[in-house]
Image: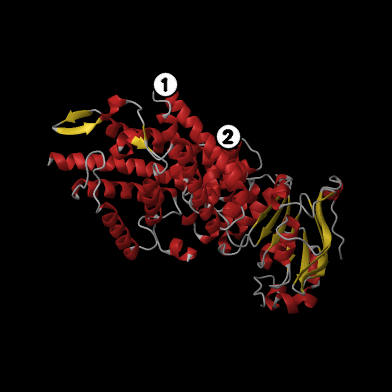
Amino acid sequence: MTQAATPEHERWPGASLRATAVSRSFEGIRALDGVTLELHRREVVGLIGPNGAGKTTLVNVMTGFDRPTAGSVELEGREITSWTPHRRGRAGLARTFQHSHSFGSLSVRENVEVAALGVGARPREARRRATELLDLLGIERKADARATTLAHGDERKLEVARALAIEPRFVLMDEPAAGLPEGEIPDFVRVLRTVRDEQGAGVLLIDHNMALVMQVCDRIHVLDQGRTLAEGSPDAVRGNLDVTAAYLGESAANGSTASAPS
Amino acid sequence: MTDDVQTLVDAVALGSIYALMAVGIGLVFGVLRLVNFAYGQLIMAGAYALALTNDQPVLLSIALCFAVVLALSLALELAAFRPLRRASPTTMLVATFAISYLLQSIALVKFGAIGKIVVVVPKLSEPVTIGGVHIRWITIMTIIVAVLVFAALMVLLTKTTIGLHMRAASIDPATARLLGVRANAVITAAVLVSGVIAAIVAVILPMAVPERLLVGPDFALRETIIVLVGVVVGGIDRLLSATLGGFTMGVAVGLLSGYLPSSGAWPFTSSVYLDSAVFMLVIIVLLIRPEGLFVRGRHAALERV
């Protein structure tokens, strides 16, 4: 079921972000229990599972916001388990947060520029990237507005633009499409494909919108209670949904938005 | 009528000085969450540098004042603020109290309790008559310098990389650090800019405020206390509201001292009622707007309770 390698991966030997047998306990509760997940460049991997399955904890461990109690994280062959988030950022690893971390009284454009400048871009280069990314995300008309004035959906897009501003080789997105109107999902799919195909980044996507996940992901990794429940191509995982339906909610099997049980 | 105009212009000039001090304190507060009670002693050090070089060419004297204040600012950052990076705001505030009194004591031991006269540019203290109103050159200069400083600061904060980083770090230090904003570089920059402003105030204050013609160990201490109150009343969370708070306090002090009965011979003409009147206004403002005079919404104050 883990059979998902495409020729693309073979051209990028070692070009992956890998969590190996990662466990994380919080006061006796096992949030993650021996999870192994590998994200290659030029692919979108969906990370799904009910609330509390450990999805965000896994992203935290991979991006350095949390340390695993066991297991290791490697970036392109280098062990990075003890690296700070910022050091990982400079090495090409970006993330978005479930809750927006934008600088409220800075303009939308400045928010993106700060991120680009932070990884060493020159001011002119930072400005160019900001223009490009706001354009890509479709919020270029809000460029000079204060970040606090953004509607929720646009705030999510800014969060994505800011993650992409460091020109990451791997980007981990924690529910980036939450709150986006259904009509804007196709635009978001286009954004993800641009990031994968044109920027050549590997994308890990957490989302409860099964239609989005099934449509855009090359592979899917299902977590439940901190363990890997299933892993493979969307079709393989969908075939397995009989098993996982209980966890993902009945609607998941129909390919629509899952109402995640809590 | 002309007296009123004169009082108003003087009050605006005093407000400009307080606004400069407020922005100097606010810049460091933004990136460090540190209320620098020792800010007045930076100004004191600069004023001593001026007083001790009265006989030197004025430009040399002013350059020395800047050098002393900047060196002291940097020394404070490296020796006091940096080791306290992870300390609570209260600890840092108390530390700056200690620094303030340490510097005052050093001044007392070194230069004695008797004030030294600061002579910068005597000509600036002469009045010019505009439409029957007598205004001293220094009053006009003070307002112009303050406007220029704020314009330069605006450019720094909005058009430069370090300025953008300062603003980002002020809003959310954790996220800024995450995005690669180098905390120490941003903090050092803020401390130095704040020091430049302290040096400017050190040059202006002895000329603009007659009572401050003499520099003693407690030079600018009273101003610092009033400005800090103004910064809190205005809203310390944002540079603009903090600055407006400082400006408002300066104007209020200027107007009140213009109208309250005077109690001494020149230059000690400020009224004994001045502090009572100023702080009564502060209490009223805090009762009406506890979140800060220039803060929109209530969340900023509530979060800190």
The image quarter containing residue B289 is: bottom left
- Label 2 crowding class (10 Å Cα cut-off): few <14, some 14-19, many 20+? few
Q: Nearer the viewer, mark 1 or mark 2?
A: 1
Image quarter (top left, top right, bottom left or bottom right) of the N terminus of chain A: bottom right
Location of residue A62 in the rendering, given as x and y in whole percent from the top left corner = 75, 57
Q: Residue at x 18, y 40 (%)?
A: B5
**Residue linked to disc 1:** B56
SS assignment at label 2: helix
| In front of the other: A198 or B29 | B29
Q: CA distance from mark 1 to mark 2?
A: 45 Å
Q: Which mark is residue A124?
A: 2
Left or right: A250 in relation to A156:
right
| In front of the other: A97 or B35 | B35
Q: Residue at x 45, y 41 (%)?
A: B108
SS assignment at label 1: loop
| In front of the other: B296 or B110 | B110
Left or right: A138 in relation to B154:
right
Residue contact at pointers 1 and 2, CB within 8 angstroms: no
Numbered disc 1: what chain? B
Q: Amino acid at mark 2?
A: Arg
